[in-house]
Amino acid sequence: MSMRLNKNYKKSIKKGFFITGTDTNVGKTLVAASISRTLISQGFSTVAIKPAASGCFIKDNKLYSHDALTLQKYSSNKTLSYSSINPFAFEEPIAPHIAAKKNGINLLVSQILSKSQEALTCNADYIIIEGAGGWFTPINDHETMADLAIAYGYPVILVVGIRLGCINHALLTYKCMDNSRIKIAGWIANVIDEEVVYLQENIEAIKLRLNVPLLGSIPYMDNVNPRRIAQILRLR
């Protein structure tokens, strides 16, 4: 899909990653925060953002995303305003295009890029961008998270939630990503079902069929911590 970018959008010269997933609630925020910590441990400065978030809470008459606050916490750059980390926040836990419409907003890729400028041009070596939902989650009637990832132009990391049905979800998402001709940096297996059977067989089946590296396998944990997970990831 072709798109007209906001004329004020300037491509950042910093390196970065766009984090997508096979679905919602598969661990994108955990992975994004962990990648930030991994890079910091390697001596790089980072900023992590969540351009659009639903399911936000109200504090002091302002909406905040738990995901965005987590990303802010695990970034090395502490100077950015919250609104530059999460420019579009919606209270209801629903798809962003529906939430935007209910709030009278015509959410566009060009708008998100424009609102990302402070983060994209800040003093950091890497930017980590977390998408909302999955690869084809709608942003409006014509654009999706895939269009946003392509517009940002950074390599994409796919988070696969390991549970029953994950092989099909992973292969379908990867196929769509590959057809978009974007650079796929790799994928991360995140075990989100404590009782999943044939765990390693599922991961190996996906690994065999995805022509990109497995960057880490996150075991099921009751208390996950990005600093812990950062030690598992193998960024290339």
Image: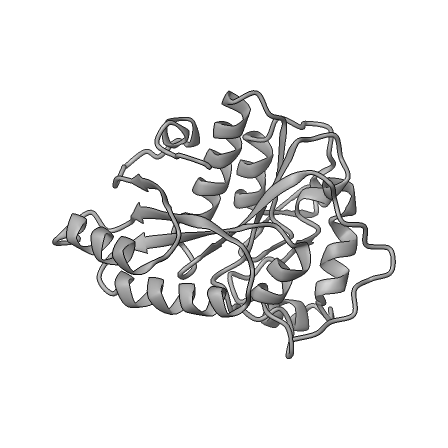
> Can the viewer see residue 91?
yes
**Looking at this view, is 139 or 218 the one in front?**
218
Q: Residue at x 43, y 32 (%)?
A: 226
Image x and y of residue 12, in percent: 74, 44
Q: Among all residues in the image, which is located at the extreme left?
A: 198
Q: Quadrant of residue 80?
A: top right
Q: Residue at x 37, y 47 (%)?
A: 213
**Looking at this view, is 135 or 234 the one in front?**
234
Q: Quadrant of residue 40?
A: top right
Q: Among all residues in the image, which is located at the extreme bottom?
A: 141
Image x and y of residue 49, in percent: 62, 44
Image x and y of residue 154, in percent: 61, 50
The answer to whether 165 is drawn above or below residue 155 in the figure is below
Q: Quadrant of residue 14?
A: top right
Q: If the image is split into quadrants, where does the N terminus sit? A: bottom right
Q: Residue at x 53, y 37 (%)?
A: 70
